[in-house]
Image (cartoon, rainbow, N blue to C red):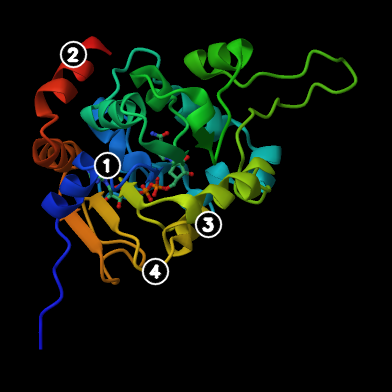
Amino acid sequence: MSIPPTTTIQSIAERIKTGQITRIIVLTGAGISTSAGIPDFRTPKTGLYDRLAPLNLPTPESIFHISYFSHSPEPFYAIAQARHPSTLKPTLSHAFLALLAKKNILHFLFTQNIDGLEEDAGVPAEKILWTHASYPDDLMRKAIKTGDVPYCLEPKCSGAIKPEVVFFGESLPEEFDEKVKLIPEADLMLVMGTSLRVAPCSGIPRMMEPGVPRVLINMERCGDMGSRDGDVSILGDCDVGVREFAEALGWRGELEALWEEV
Ligand code: CNA
């Protein structure tokens, strides 16, 4: 009985280099931004959930829940300020996404992040869906910079202004349903820096056609990644994993140069 060929990051790189893979769908999460200094949610000790303990919230998720925000907006703005990324540089992982776009093989990027670093790195906005947020406008940026809750200037209202962020308990933009239709067209899925614990993005990897390769670059295993034939997992820091992938592609120098420039 012949043993089926194993998929490796090298064999996937080879298929990219020879033009057999040209439409990559990427799903990213907070883990691709931790090396830029933005904490994720769930990493023990450094993640926001452990840091929120002193606020005595009903649950850590409450801070991002619409029902909690409506009566207590202060913790959200305090955290948003701590996460304000205006001075942060995109990571090597963000630069890798920009390189995929530059090579014209980034089919689409679903990001769960609200830091905007993918776009700062050079990924064109039309290739990105921010599944949990749209970027705050100037006023909101100012509020996030100071950490002060912005209140409505209308005297009859004077309620706290909600940022253009999709909170838990709210529906995602209609665009999500539209963009997931791109998934069956893809010939590779890359999942980076996410625990795959937040719906509906957690379901994206399972939307890939069986037999189409999926690559996970993450600190830990997550979702059903690694369970299918054709799955490849590079476990550990995503900037390190991305370097390994770029090395296999022969793009390492180009990646480092692009990252220098961002
Ligand atoms: P999460 O649940 O905190 O998971 C993060 C994942 O990344 C975990 O599996 C970690 O092990 C992994 N990870 C952390 N650091 C690294 C690293 N350096 N290299 C590789 N893997 C790493 O966050 P998710 O993104 O899965 O959850 C979705 C939430 C997170 C969305 O609602 C976001 O808005 C929210 N979030 C976004 C940001 C941001 O915009 N940068 C920051 C914190 C939380």
Task: Residue type at mark 4: give it.
Answer: Pro
The picture places residue 32, in percent across and down from the top left corner, at 29, 37
Mark closer to the observer (1, 2): 1
Quickly name the residue at label 3: 199
Mark closer to the observer (1, 3): 1
The picture places residue 60, in percent across and down from the top left corner, at 47, 50
Residue 260 seen in render: yes
- Residue at left offset 28%, top offset 48%: 20
Give left or right: position of 94 versus 237.
right
Judged from the image, the secondary structure of the residue bearing numbered disc 3 is: loop
Label 3 CB sits under 8 Å from any ligand 1 atom: no
Sequence order check, earlier mark of 1 and 3: 1
Q: Residues within 10 Å of mark 2 (few under 14, many from 20)?
A: few
Sequence order check, earlier mark of 1 and 2: 1
Sequence order check, earlier mark of 2 and 3: 3
Residue 198 seen in render: no
Residue 258 lies, with reference to residue 198, above or below; the image says above
Q: Residues within 10 Å of mark 4 (few under 14, many from 20)?
A: few
Mark closer to the observer (4, 1): 1
Circle 2/circle 3 CB separation < 8 Å: no
Task: Residue type at mark 2: give it.
Answer: Glu
The C terminus - image quarter: top left
The residues tagged by marks 1 and 3 sit, at their Cα atoms, a distance apart of 33 Å
The N terminus - image quarter: bottom left
Sequence order check, earlier mark of 3 and 4: 3
Sequence order check, earlier mark of 4 and 2: 4
Judged from the image, the secondary structure of the residue bearing numbered disc 1 is: loop
The picture places residue 78, in percent across and down from the top left corner, at 49, 27
Mark closer to the observer (4, 2): 4
Residue 2 lies, with reference to residue 15, above or below; the image says below
* Foreground of the two, 156 or 80: 80
